[in-house]
């Protein structure tokens, strides 16, 4: 497998939308709005990082990262997600490659750290951990995780951009 990771381009948007929809179609804990969220973030100019995984000129994965706010006033924090891989390409390391590239991109931007909502068993291997005092309202604390890029972890309630409420 010869996969490259690059920044999204305008001509990728339709494929990213279809890919994201397909990737979450059978996910139990999904609202099935992830494709709408990515497009709403893009329209609001809130995609700080948007990378695609490409193999043989075909997009097979995508990751989105957007700024988040923390009630304590901590700055430089971002939320990772959604991250999507075509169902027939999952389990081949594409998601891991996207994660590593996205986190490296955030560090290059000078980010303080990154949060995400997801499976601790999967995201723990990238250094993400649940932290007492850092929360996302309405979410079981073990699934809301953070990774600091060197500084202290903030304390407070994290809020994602309103685009995460998009339903179309």
Image (cartoon, rainbow, N blue to C red):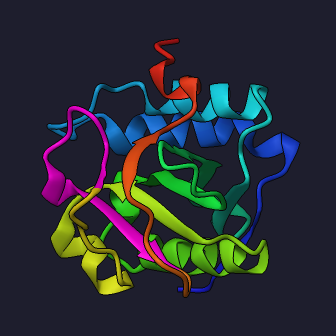
Q: Single out the residue that lies furthest toward the right.
A: 10
For this view, does 14 lie left or right of residue 22? right
Q: Is residue 11 magenta?
A: no
How many numbered callouts? 0
Whether residue 128 is visible here, answered yes or no, is yes
Q: Single out the residue that lies furthest toward the top.
A: 168
Q: Residue at x 65, y 40 (%)?
A: 15
Residue 138 or residue 125, whichever sits in front: 138
Q: Single out the residue that lies furthest toward the front.
A: 72
Residue 78 appears in which quarter of the rendering? bottom right
Q: Residue at x 27, y 35 (%)?
A: 137
For this view, does 91 lie left or right of residue 60? left
- Taking 125 as reference, is 19 above or below it? above
Q: Is residue 141 magenta?
A: yes
- Taking 130 as reference, is 62 above or below it? above
Residue 3 or residue 69, whichever sits in front: 69
């Amino acid at each position: 497998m010869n996969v490259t990771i690059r920044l999204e381009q305008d001509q990728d948007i339709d494929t990213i939308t279809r890919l994201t929809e397909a990737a979450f179609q059978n996910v139990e804990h999904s609202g099935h709005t992830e494709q709408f969220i990515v497009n709403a973030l893009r329209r609001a100019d809130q995609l700080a990082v948007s990378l695609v995984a490409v193999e043989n000129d075909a997009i097979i994965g995508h990751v989105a990262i957007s700024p988040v706010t923390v009630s304590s006033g901590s700055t430089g924090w971002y939320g990772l997600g959604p991250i999507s891989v075509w169902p027939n390409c999952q389990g081949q390391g594409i998601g891991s490659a996207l994660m590593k590239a996205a986190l490296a991109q955030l560090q290059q931007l000078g980010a303080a750290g990154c949060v995400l909502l997801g499976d601790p068993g999967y995201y723990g291997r990238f250094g993400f951990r649940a932290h007492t005092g850092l929360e996302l309202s309405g979410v079981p604390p073990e699934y809301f995780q953070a990774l600091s890029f060197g500084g202290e972890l903030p304390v407070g309630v994290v809020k994602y951009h309103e685009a995460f409420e998009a339903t179309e």
